[in-house]
Amino acid sequence: MSVEAPGTARSRSAVQAGAVDVTVLICTRNRAQQLKNVLETATCMRIPEGLRWELVVVDNGSSDNTSEVAAGFGGHLPIRVVREDAPGLSHARNRGVAEAAGTYICWTDDDVLIDPNWLCAYVEAFARHPEAAVFGGEIIPVLQGPTPKWFARLADQWPLTTLLAKRNYGEQPIRLGFKEGVIPWGANFAVRAAEQRQVRYEAALGVSPLHRRVGEETEVVFRILQSGGVGWWAPGARVRHIIPTQRQTLRHFYEYFQSYGETAAYMERAWPAAHHMAWSTRDMRRVRGSALSLYTRAAAHGAMFIAARLLGATRRSLQFLMIAGIHIGAARIAGSRVALEISEPAEGKGL
C-alpha cells in the first residue's frame, strides 16, 4: 500500500528509475517520535542547486502514527510514504529499493540526526567518483543521559564502538574494502541504484520480529564489492546516531553480540566462507562447533567477565562478555533445526 504525503502527487508507478538524481530512504517501525526528529533535521539540509531528489519513508507495519508523522512533512520535503507489512528490516529495504526513483540511493536510519551538509557531501562524492557503486559516511554516536560512568569512559573504545555503530575514516576520500576494514554501516551509506537493484537485502538477515540477526546492509555492500564494484568513503556525509539510556547497559551489549553470533553462525551455514563475516577468521572460529562446545565456551568467558568485572568495568571485561554473547548466539543456531532461508549468494537476485 502506498500512502502519498500531501503535496506529492506522483507515485512510484508514475516515476521510472532515474527520474530523479537521489532517493533518500528511511525504514521505520513504531518510532514515530524518532522519525519526527530525523525528518526535522532533513528539512535543514542544504540541497545542491538543481538537484532532483526525493525522500521515501518505508513504514514497516507500524501500529503507531508513523505514517501520519511522515506525511506531515509533505509541505517541507519531497516525501513519499509507503507501507511494507512483511516484518523485518530487509523486507522494508527491498520495498524502498523497488519504490526509489533515484539514480543513487542514500540510506539512513530513523534514530539519527542528519548533518546539514550530508546530502551535499554525497552528491559531491557521486560526481568525484562516477565509477563507484557504494559510498559511506561518518556516524557519530550521541549518548542520551543519564549515561553510566563506565559506559561514558569506554564509549570511544572497541568493542563499544561496534555497539554504537561509530564510523570515522577521516577527512579524505579513501577506498572502501573489507580487507582493510573500511566498511560503511546501515545508518549512513549510499548505493548506486543500478547495482542496488541487482542485490537484494536478504530476509534471513537484519532486525526482525522473527529472529535476532544483523548485517543485511553489510552483506549487500560485500556482494557489490566482491563482484567488482568500487566503493569510496565520503567525508562530510555525517549523521549523529542517538543512543538512548536503555541501550547503554550491559544487557543490551550482551544481547547485541548474541545477535552478532547468531548472524555469523547462520551465514556460515548458508554461505560457507562466502559472506562478509568470513573475512574475520577470529570471529568465525568463535561461532564454529557443536551447541555443547559453544555453550561451554560461553560459560567460561562469562566466568572471566565476572572475575574481570570485580576489578572494575574495564575494556577487557567487555571483551569477555562480547565473546560469551557471540558463543551463545552461535549455539542457538548450532542447536536448532533452523531451515536455511538463503539458498545462494545474493548476486543476481534483482528486484
Image (tube, rainbow, N blue to C red):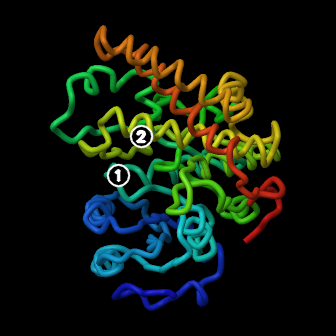
Q: Amino acid at mark 2?
A: Ile
Residue 325 sits above or below residue 218 on the image: above
Q: For the residues marked 2 and 1, what is the alpha-carbon distance in whole angstroms? A: 9 Å
Measuring from the top left, give residue 329's x and y in whole percent.
58, 39
Identify which residue, 297 or 228, lies in the foreground: 297
Q: Quadrant of residue 99?
A: bottom right
Is residue 60 left or right of 336 when viewed as pictured?
left
Tell me whether the residue at label 2 lies in contact with that at label 1, contact meaning CB atoms closer than 8 angstroms.
Answer: yes
At a point 27% along the width and 66% down the height, the residue shown is: 36
Measuring from the top left, give residue 331's x and y in whole percent.
63, 38
Q: Earlier in the sequence, mark 2 or mark 1?
A: 1
Q: Circle 1 sits on which residue?
A: 112
Measuring from the top left, give residue 171's x and y in whole percent.
46, 30
Identify which residue, 137 or 317, lies in the foreground: 317
Q: Circle 2 sits on which residue?
A: 139
Q: How many marks?
A: 2
Q: Quadrant of residue 305?
A: top left
Measuring from the top left, give residue 53's x and y in whole percent.
48, 70
What is the quadrant of the C terminus in the image? bottom right
Q: Amino acid at mark 1?
A: Val
For label 1, the crowd category at 10 Å Cα-Cα, with few meaning under 14, some 14 to 19 and many 20 or more, is many
Q: Secondary structure beneath disc 1?
A: strand
At a point 67% along the width and 45% down the height, the residue shown is: 333
Is residue 151 left or right of 29 when viewed as pictured?
left
